[in-house]
Amino acid sequence: MGRFVVRRVASTIGVLIAISIFTFLIFQAIPNGDPALRLAGRTATQTQIEAIRHTWGFDKPIYIQYLRTMEKIFDGSVVSYNQGFNVEEEIRRDLPVTASLALGAGFIWLALGIVFGALSAWRAGRWLDRGLTVLSMIGVSMPVFFLGAVLAYYVGDKWGVLPPGDYVKLTEDPWGWLEHLVMPWFALSVLFIGVYSRVLRSTILDNINDDYVRTARAKGLSERQVMIRHVLRNSLIPIISLWGLDFASVIGGGAILTESVFNLHGVGQYAAQSVQALDIPSVLVITMFGAFTVVLLSAIVDVVYAALDPRIRL
Amino acid sequence: MSDPERLLEVRDLRVCFQTEGGVVKAVGGVSFDVDRGEVVAIVGESGSGKSVTAMTLMGLTRSANASFQGSARFEGTELIAAREDQLRRIRGARIAMIFQDPMSSLNPVQRVGEQIVEQIRVHDHAISKRAAGERAITLMARVGIPQARERARSYPHEFSGGMRQRAMIAMALSCSPSLLIADEPTTALDVTIQAQIISELKQLCEETGAAVILVSHDLGVVADIADRVLVMYGGRIVEQATLDELFYDPQHPYTWGLLGSIARLDRDRTQRLPAIAGMPPSLVNPPEGCHFRPRCPHAFERCTQVPGLDSRLAQGSGHLDRCWLSPEQKRKLRSVEGVIGLASDETVIA
Amino acid sequence: MSTDPALAATGTEFSSDVARELQKEGGIGPYRLAARRLARNKVALAFGALFALIVVMCLLAPVYAHDIAHTGPNDEHITQVIKVAGKPTDVLSPVGIPIGPTWHGRFFLGADGSGRDVAVRLLYGGRNSLEIGIEATFITILLASILGIVGAYFRGPLDGLISRAFDLIWAYPVYLLGIALGVTLQLQGLDLGVFKIKGSSLVLTALIIGFVFIPYVGKPIRGQVLVLREREFIDAARQQGLGSLRIMFGEVLPNVASTIIVFIPLILANSILTEAGLSYLGAGVQDPNPSWGTMISDGIRLIPAAIHLVLVPGLMLVLAVLGINVFGDGVRDALDPRARIRIEH
């Protein structure tokens, strides 16, 4: 186990470096374009562009540019030129919003995904399975911003059941926090519930034919014990690791559509607004932040996975 | 049934599976008995219905597309028609089973010791977890797993094939069953381990007094341990005899073929091991009459009728077979073929 | 039971091995068998037909625009007054709220905030959405298959490079990478020397989406080929002296073909959804070009006033994607009843 962790950490560092280079290349070195011009945004003056060219080192060789960029990201001194804010301060301010969204939604989609998937597999081929299959199909076919907009309009504006958007701080108004997040949680969860229930269903149906399940029956376990202790328990292992990755991606700005449509000032919405303003420095930092989050959390997921499934510790 | 020594009585057991390709008649009317402490081997090639027969006794072939006929009485309980909860009390406790592939038959993400503990605690609600754990370690030591205390905390993939099968045996014997069904217990193992496992299995069963149904495609494995042998072909028993009778006076041409395909040290090395020509019969559209007819070099007109499983040797003998040939004809055909059990002329190639 | 080939072959288990056995014995081939299973799945066929219908409708967009609505997708009718139920009505009310569905001729599904015909834009937008989806799917499937097969077949440093590249792309949240590429490329377009793509081109969006999804297909294919290359028939082909290209495309490809086929509808559905998401974020299709995503996005801005601007393109999008997904699920069930092929999403 120890050696496994060490190896995983080493490969994670490698991927992080690769990501930083690749992200740098996307923003600073894509052919046909002056990176300074791109960073400066649409409203920049010539002197501003010159200043950017100098501070980011665009008049230097490309590896210096890369190092300069990384240095600026790590000492937290990236400033967006359109809005004039420090990008990393903005991200730090937005992170609790994104975390609130991710935690609630992650819990909902994991719980419902498992329940629906298990029910679906248990009743495979019957009407309950068919009904859940239809629902999950609709779920995975639904763009979250469309679902969010329609929910916000009907549940929020028209019927006034829940507030249609915005974020309220947990520390200021816990009830308001919950009330404002329920709809985004569900909107974001729908896709994942669909995916998870399908994955769990097919994993269970796969495992059900395995030899060790036959052994469990031969031991005299009841069908319920066989299903819960052996089939479900083993089938949940891939679901848990899938959850870790998706959760990481949501924390890292992957919930960009949900945050935008419900006007939650999280990392994702920050990215979306920066895109609309063509504010490249912030998109650069958020993209790198997002990928870093995914890589770091997925390394943790792998270690947890190895703890759950001893076979892959080799 | 009145016989107190009689442990299991199977009568005219039939198993069919509904599949996309049609109805598979996996077992077509099988009858046999097992006495207490007896070792009965069921031998046949894959598709002969031997595994399905064994698993049906445990109720492990039950599914929506399976249908069953006939009866199997075990210690006074009817197994085939039993309710699932009745069966559950028998499974693992009175009848235990070990399977072919010990790698996939153990739960890969559960410690080996825990899996044995689970088996013990399913049938003994009173026992504490700790006591069950101790018993699991004792059992593991007894089946020859060294350092059982440490190994109980290992996962199946950390065991060698032979050790895994020993763990399976420990698990199967944990509730002192009166019948142990071993479905190809050594097929997935190295040849060197096979004999070891088989002799340990025999010894353990003698100690505990458990009867064994040993399912195998390999007469060589069976020869070490079986008291009686059932030869199955195409879902039917084609010959039933004691081990000695089967080896020294085999009656069914299929058995001759089986005997011919055992590797023997006394045979000329330049000869290839003979195999039985042709393909196993389709279980969806089995051949009319004797199922072995299409592959049998000695088939004649009468073979289009199903021969009964009768004693054709001395009156009242327990040696039964399903072949229309008379014992004299069989003896002659066998001696023409030279070596006992050499199947058909095409298979002997220098 | 699993050791009995008679049961395995006739049961629900369906591996290429068993299929080959069946074929040898004069049975039916794996694809015929799959087609037969699919033909029995009426639900999947119905949803496949729904998608086909949407495609045909979108292809007929110019006919509808010319002969029924008498207006183009980008024609604005801000000051026009039309008759609804005999009464003259403004297309855009004085405060800028567009007219809802008239269920008749022009503005059958109402107008949008710029006085454009929603029905006409819906069909033209569908053309763009579908075009991007299909192009992106083509790019993903083609590159992922080649990279996955070549990498796993040759192993070594090339494979290391390819699978690291997969890991790299895979690490980015899909939409973040999408907008990152979208926003930088749109600013100045893509110039790869040989060919240039303008920033406003639909192909650029398709290229971005196609690129982002490569590892989701490439990884599983690579995994399958890693197993395949150790099999005897590949050895046999090598021993016969067949060239690597012949083996990869003559022996390996047919054995991963069913995986590739299963991924096509999955990637198509996800590409269309991603296009909509990127367009909503402003990093996809650019105004005035319509696409379902941009239309929803435009509608959301007018939301309390004119919900039909969100519902019309949104429902169309959901129906199209649902059609692909249910049909694709049927294809997967038919090819691989034990459902070994999956996509994370």
Image: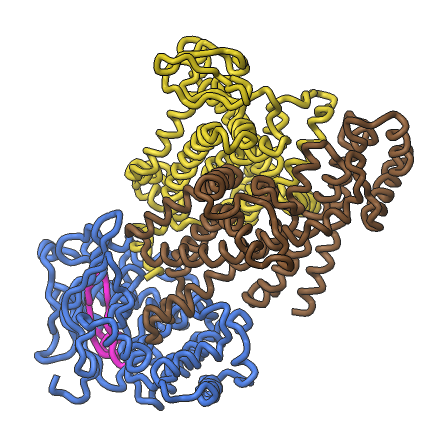
Above or below, C56 against A167 in this view is above
Give the color scheme: rainbow, by chain, secondary structure or one colour. by chain
- Say how many tags the image has: 0
In this view, the residue in front, C331 or B318, is C331
* Rendered colour, chain B: blue
In this view, the residue in front, C239 or A259, is A259
Identify the residue at image location x=36%, y=67%.
A214
Above or below, B50 against A278 in this view is below
Quadrant where the image shows the N terminus of chain C:
bottom left
Is residue B5 found inside the magenta-colored segment of the image? no
Residue C245 visible in this rendered orientation of the protein: no
Q: Quadrant of residue B76?
A: bottom left
Identify the residue at image location x=11%, y=71%.
B310
- Which chain is the one coloured brown? A
- Residue A244 at x, y percent in the picture: 58, 56
Please indicate whether residue C197 sits to the left or right of residue C104 in the image: right
Identify the residue at image location x=46%, y=51%.
A193
- Residue B221 at x, y percent in the picture: 36, 74
- Residue A291 at x, y percent in the picture: 68, 47
Is residue B230 found inside the magenta-colored segment of the image? yes
Please indicate whether residue A35 sits to the left or right of residue C32 in the image: right
- Which chain is the one coloured yellow? C
In this view, the residue in front, A48 or B344, is A48
Above or below, C335 against A10 in this view is above
